[in-house]
Image (cartoon, rainbow, N blue to C red):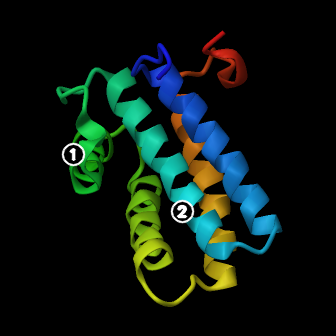
Amino acid sequence: MSNWQLTPEAMMVKASTACSSARALLDLGDVDGAANRAYYAMFDAARAALLASGAPVEPDVGRTHSGLIGAFGNHLVKNGPISKEVGRLLNRAHEIRLVADYNGNSVESDDAREMVKQAEIFVSVIRTEFMPNKPIDRLLT
């Protein structure tokens, strides 16, 4: 196990990597894999936002998906700074990921494509709002 710490910057690195993976999986035709990685990009970015915002949440806020999504909505969407439209992207991604990971059917190709785009938007919004002056690709070096 590495010496990795739970910081907003580290979570954004994970989010950025998951976005890249989602795009690559989509290009390979793995719609379920793309949906999974797109969701986790958003999940990690939401976790980074909560930590960076100073919201009164436990450091392990990402322990449950519903806990993280609820905290994100309550602390960052309900009264800003994140728009309700962007907040809904996380909820929708969670629904699609459940189909991708636990349903016998695959995610529709159009849904996966849209979800990857939405993950890229979501991660970009979080980066702009909470870490505007930090180059994400080199945060851990």
- Of residue 43 and residue 130, the one placed in the foreground of this image is 43
| Residue sitting at x 59%, y 54% | 119
C-alpha span from label 1 to label 2: 24 Å
List x then y, in percent, for residue 117.
Answer: 67, 60
State the residue in front, 109 or 63: 63
Dot 1 amino acid type:
Asn
Question: Which residue is label 1 attached to?
Answer: 74
* SS class, disc 1: helix
Residue 36's disc number? 2
Mark 2 closeness class: few <14, some 14–19, many ≥20 residues within 10 Å? many
- Using residue 60 as the reference point, say whether residue 124 is left or right of it: right
Q: Is residue 95 above or below residue 14?
A: below
Residue 30 shown left or right of residue 58 in the figure: right
The label nearer to you, 1 versus 2, is: 2
Q: Which tag, 1 or 2, sits closer to the chain's start?
A: 2
Instruction: Tell me the crowding category of disc 1: few under 14, some 14 to 19, or many 20 or more residues within 10 angstroms, Cα based.
Output: few
